[in-house]
Amino acid sequence: AQSVTQLDSHVSVSEGTPVLLRCNYSSSYSPSLFWYVQHPNKGLQLLLKYTSAATLVKGINGFEAEFKKSETSFHLTKPSAHMSDAAEYFCVVNTGTASKLTFGTGTRLQVTL
Amino acid sequence: NAGVTQTPKFRILKIGQSMTLQCTQDMNHNYMYWYRQDPGMGLKLIYYSVGAGITDKGEVPNGYNVSRSTTEDFPLRLELAAPSQTSVYFCASSYLPGPPRGEQYFGPGTRLTVT
């Protein structure tokens, strides 16, 4: 079975400082991994995806994530936070059949002045 | 392309009422999905479809029904609404598995309250 654990339910950073959102996964197969972002009262938007190509994946809005098989991790980072980054972030794994996705419980990112 | 569209945006139901949440995609995707999102939680899969005429249960199917008569539409039916079905419902679609695997495109959601 596949599962995703987001290690922090809430992260608060100051504007201009680095962002780190942590995600560990469990998968019986070589996984596809995703980060989605959800702004308040909005739908989900794909930030980036890992599909067994380069282990360092670059996404939109300056975010990137590194797939580390030995650590079963897929942490999301950004060098400098912006106020507009405040949102809920979901780490997601593809279960491999019918493209079904398993979602983590989410990390709420707060950005302060 | 409009992408994935959902109607209505908001709805309040009384206990025992029924309703259908509509979902349409114009990307010619074969795969479609319904999720629910409860406060402070990730999304949980209710039902999915791999093509017209083919549907299957997800993680939390009880109290819901689906049909898929066309590639574009994937309505979700709630029969005998219960307060436990108060949630935000998201429809999504994706193309066939293959690189990039599993990327799904989401609609804006329907916020449903059952009182």
Image (cartoon, rainbow, N blue to C red):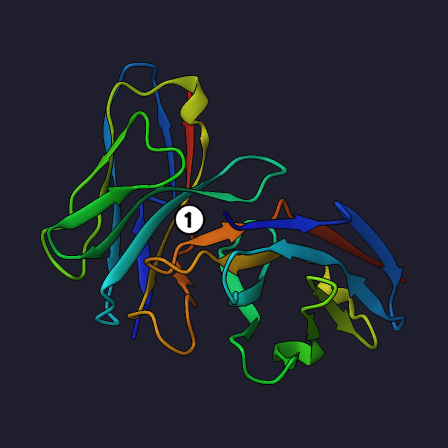
Dot 1 crowding, Cα within 10 Å, few <14, some 14–19, many 20+: many
Chain under label 1? B
Please give the name of the residue rendered at 45% of the width and 54% of the height, measured from the top-left corner.
A101
Q: Is residue B92 rendered to the left or right of residue A54?
A: left
* Observer able to see residue A38: no
* Observer able to see residue B55: yes
Q: Extreme bottom residue here? A: A54
Residue A59 location (% of width, % of height): 62, 78
Q: Is residue A21 rendered to the left or right of residue B18?
A: right
What kind of element bears circle 1? loop
Three-letter amino acid code at the position of disc 1? Gly
Question: Is the C terminus of chain A in the top left, top right, bottom left or bottom right quadrant?
Answer: bottom right
Q: Is residue A86 rendered to the left or right of residue A19?
A: left
Residue B111 location (% of width, % of height): 44, 39
Please give the name of the residue rendered at 72% of the width and 50% of the height, measured from the top-left corner.
A108
Is residue B35 or residue B8 the one in the foreground?
B35
Is residue B80 or residue A66 the one in the foreground?
A66
Residue matched to label 1: B109
Please give the name of the residue rendered at 90% of the width and 70% of the height, measured from the top-left corner.
A17
Is residue B90 or residue A8 the one in the foreground?
A8
Please give the name of the residue rendered at 83% of the width and 77% of the height, measured from the top-left corner.
A79
Is residue B12 or residue B74 the one in the foreground?
B74
Residue B82 location (% of width, % of height): 37, 18
Residue B85 location (% of width, % of height): 41, 26
Q: Quadrant of residue A60?
A: bottom right
On screen, B10 above or below A35?
above
On screen, B81 above or below A70?
above
